[in-house]
Amino acid sequence: MAVRGWGRSVATATGVAAGAGAAQLGLGYGLGIVAWLPSVDIGGESAWVASLAWATWIVATSVVIGAVVADRLAPSATTDGAAPDARWQPESLLTASLWRLALAAAAAVGGMLIVALIAVPARSATRADTFSPQTIAAGYAMVGAVVGLLMAIWAVASRAAAVNAIATVGWLWLLAVVAVVDSVLAGAGLTSAQLGVWQITADDERYWFRNIYWPGAALSLGSAFIIGAVSAWPAARDARRRIGAAISGCVGPVLIAAAYFLAAPRLVGPRAEQLSAHLLAPYAVIAGLAGSVLVTAIAQRLEVSRQRAARTDADRTEADPPGTAAGDGSGDADDRRDAPVPAQPAGGPTSGAAGATGQAPARGTASVAAPGRGHPSAPGGGSPS
């Protein structure tokens, strides 16, 4: 059953990665986000750099998605005593490492299957520096698959890393769609959108600090920080997964930074907003890492506070057990209940010798009869005849 389960998961990883890559490329081509244009002007050169970055990033993220989904859809355990819906878990570190490597490799194969969807349309991009632009585009896609393979191993091992990668994918596509809609509403039509870039304001010098577009910088760094913090919080609450949660915030930004670095390693060709995004990519990695580290530290601090409060309550309970606290009156009531009750004479207060000495006759002794008829010492009473 284990071999059958492994084969099913490997096939799932390959299929999901290929499907995710095809879906993302279809969305990119349909919205004009990925456009292979002849580089006859600065617009064509910018579209070429942006398309290379998108292609690399799409393949890398597809590999991560395929491995993560296959791991989450692992076959149910069917061993003795196991619940039918229990997920299979590796029994040793070696088995776990082989499992992660197998899923990541299978997902990388699925990512390689979409290289044709990149290379064939790239033939329309006329380049002065090469006679075969499709070969360059396919090479970038293959490098993206390798990057995705490395990130997929990490994402399968750490759930916080997987959540961060998938959340980053969703955020970047949302940002790209918003940028395209804004371009259409502005009358520019479908234009090639940049990876993780949206020029919110008009092109004005007051929004630039040297080569940095600071509204875009705030959007990029802020989103990386928030995604890193939110995706790491559930895992940070578990002490066993806290280390993985602390470093999970850099997974998504690392994929973006790798795509930017591979697309324009010498920073030649991108437009001003693209150059700003290239320069900010490493700082986005730091921002995402800062978000995950911050929430991990907060979770650890809260846990220490709870443990300290629990120890304080336990010490207080041991020092003052229930029922012995001062001022509750329970001890005095017990003493009064256990104290002997003084004996009272049967006939009330006595007179004569008993009253003189202040002593009462003991309980259980016969009392002296009052003088009267029939008593030998009574006056007027004769002896019996």
Image (spheres, helix red, strand yellow):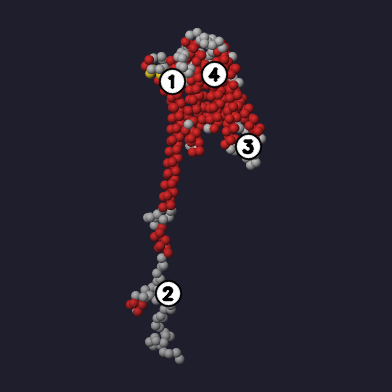
- Check disc 3 and report its element: helix, strand or loop: loop
Q: How many angstroms separate mark 3 from mark 2 (CA)?
A: 84 Å
Q: How many angstroms separate mark 3 from mark 4 (CA)?
A: 39 Å
Q: The residue under label 1 is which amino acid type?
A: Leu
- Check disc 2 and report its element: helix, strand or loop: loop
**Image x and y of residue 137, in percent:** 55, 16
Relative to 298, is 309 above or below? below
Which numbered dot is residue 266? none
Q: The residue under label 4 is which amino acid type?
A: Tyr
Q: Earlier in the sequence, mark 4 or mark 1?
A: 4
Which residue is identified by label 1? 279
Relative to 50, is 319 above or below? below
Which residue is identified by label 2? 363
Q: Earlier in the sequence, mark 3 or mark 2?
A: 3
Identity of the residue furthest to the bottom in this view: 385
Look at the image and tell me in which quarter the N terminus lies.
Answer: top right
Q: How many angstroms separate mark 1 from mark 2 (CA)?
A: 107 Å
Residue shown at the point (45%, 22%) measured from the top left: 281
Image depth: mark 1 or mark 3 in front: 1
Look at the image and tell me in which quarter the C terminus lies.
Answer: bottom left
Q: Earlier in the sequence, mark 1 or mark 2?
A: 1
Q: Are marks 1 and 2 in contact (CB under 8 Å)?
A: no
Which residue is identified by label 4? 140
Image depth: mark 2 or mark 4 in front: 4
Q: How many angstroms separate mark 4 from mark 1 (CA)?
A: 20 Å
Image depth: mark 3 or mark 2 in front: 3
Please tell me in which quadrant of the rendered image residue 371 appears. Answer: bottom left
Which residue is identified by label 3? 77
Residue 74 or 138: which is nearer the viewer? 138
